[in-house]
Amino acid sequence: MEDSVAIHGNTWKLADIAEDVALCKGLSWQPSHYTKAGDHSHCAICWWSLTVSDDPTIGQGYVSGTNHLIWLCSECYGKFIAIP
């Protein structure tokens, strides 16, 4: 097993994000567009900024929760959640 992973061109130690990945694997996720104009949120794993944009890398992700939303960028969702 590798001890690091590339996310958005940056190398992350798996040990540094293991707790966040484990938490996120236990949640239910829905694809979503970020819609809160003038604001942003961060991916719960890599801290990538999500904001209102036509660029899918920053304007689309996955959301969990109803009152307090938790976001994942599409890359982290694909690398850690959508895998079998």
Image (tube, grey):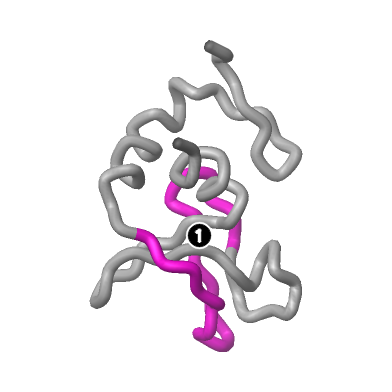
Across and down, in percent, residue 29 comes to 38, 60
Q: Position of residue 66 (x, y in %)?
A: 26, 75
User: Would you place residue 27 above or below residue 30 in this image?
Assistant: above
* Residue 30 vertical placement versus 19 (above, below): below
Residue 50 in the magenta stretch? The answer is no
| Residue displayed at 32% across by 36% down | 22
Residue 51: which quarter of the image? bottom right
Identify the magenta region: 29-49
Is label 1 in a helix, a strand or a loop?
Answer: strand
Nearer to us in this view, 70 or 77:
77
In terms of secondary structure, what is the magenta stretch mainly?
loop
Taking the view exactly as shown, the residue that stands out farthest to the top is: 1
Q: Is residue 61 left or right of residue 44?
A: right
Residue 55, placed above or below residue 47: below
Which corner quadrant holds the C terminus? top left
What residue is disc 1 on?
42
Q: Amino acid at mark 1?
A: His
Q: Residue at x 59, y 20 (%)?
A: 4
Q: Residue at x 67, y 29 (%)?
A: 11
* Residue 19, x across and y down, in percent: 33, 32
- Figure quadrant of residue 48: bottom right
- Residue at position x 55%, y 77% in the image: 33
